[in-house]
Image (cartoon, rainbow, N blue to C red):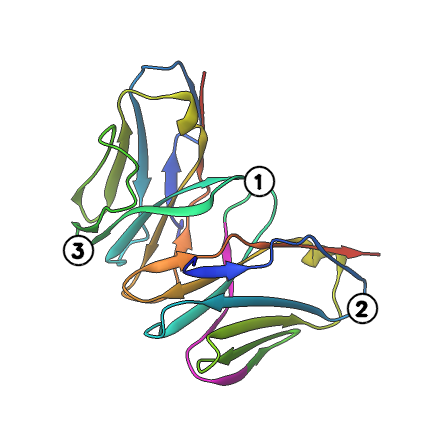
Amino acid sequence: DAGVIQSPRHEVTEMGQEVTLRCKPISGHNSLFWYRQTMMRGLELLIYFNNNVPIDDSGMPEDRFSAKMPNASFSTLKIQPSEPRDSAVYFCASSSGYNEQFFGPGTRLTVL
Amino acid sequence: QKEVEQNSGPLSVPEGAIASLNCTYSDRGSQSFFWYRQYSGKSPELIMFIYSNGDKEDGRFTAQLNKASQYVSLLIRDSQPSDSATYLCAVIVNDMRFGAGTRLTVKP
């Protein structure tokens, strides 16, 4: 199994630009999570999906953030417009039910 | 009060010693408890999970859970320099909530 796949691994963009992060969960997992990690705030849950349906998006910081999961094998997290304070590592994780979560390698986002 | 609290450290122990990492949580309904290890620049990886009160051992690692005190800990015996990392405590109620992590350094 390839594990959770995220792309891109690194993204550098300018303030105001749209950023799209992508995630492919582990096949057979029915839950998908998006996290953001910074030194100041640690690991924060942004949103999670169960069976492709968003369950809890209370961690999404603002309307500039949106996430979709059109099918069981793909999810996106979009930031539009991006701001410097969005700079962080964004992790996608997947799990089967309320079990351990497997994390992807993360996307390091830098907004200039 | 934060949902999951950990001492941010850094915690420094000599090689071969026991490292003790602690975590408290606020929601008494929490049922599942996890310890993740995160090396610098890498993603978190699960090292232990525990659901029942008491101790659970896996090699050099022991997780301890006390639901009455809302406390979960991780002991690392015979600490090695390769154990140097940030350890994240995670708790599931409706979803998984992480503590801020404790940075552990094992000195040769």
Which of the 4 quarters of the picture holds residue B51?
A: bottom left
Kindly identify the residue that appears in the image at 59 percent across and 70 percent down: B74
Question: Is residue A108 at least partly visible in the picture?
Answer: no
Q: Is residue B21 above or below residue B39?
A: below
Amino acid type at image mark 3: Asn
Residue A73 is left or right of residue B62, and the answer is: left
- Residue extending farthest to the bottom is B54
The residue beneath circle 2 is B16
Percent of width and height locating residue B47: 53, 65
Helix, strand or loop at label 2? It is loop
Chain letter for mark 3: A
Kindly identify the residue that appears in the image at 26 percent across and 23 percent down: A80
- Label the magenta part by its dominant secondary structure: strand
The residue beneath circle 3 is A51
- Most foreground residue, A67 or B103: B103
The residue beneath circle 1 is B41
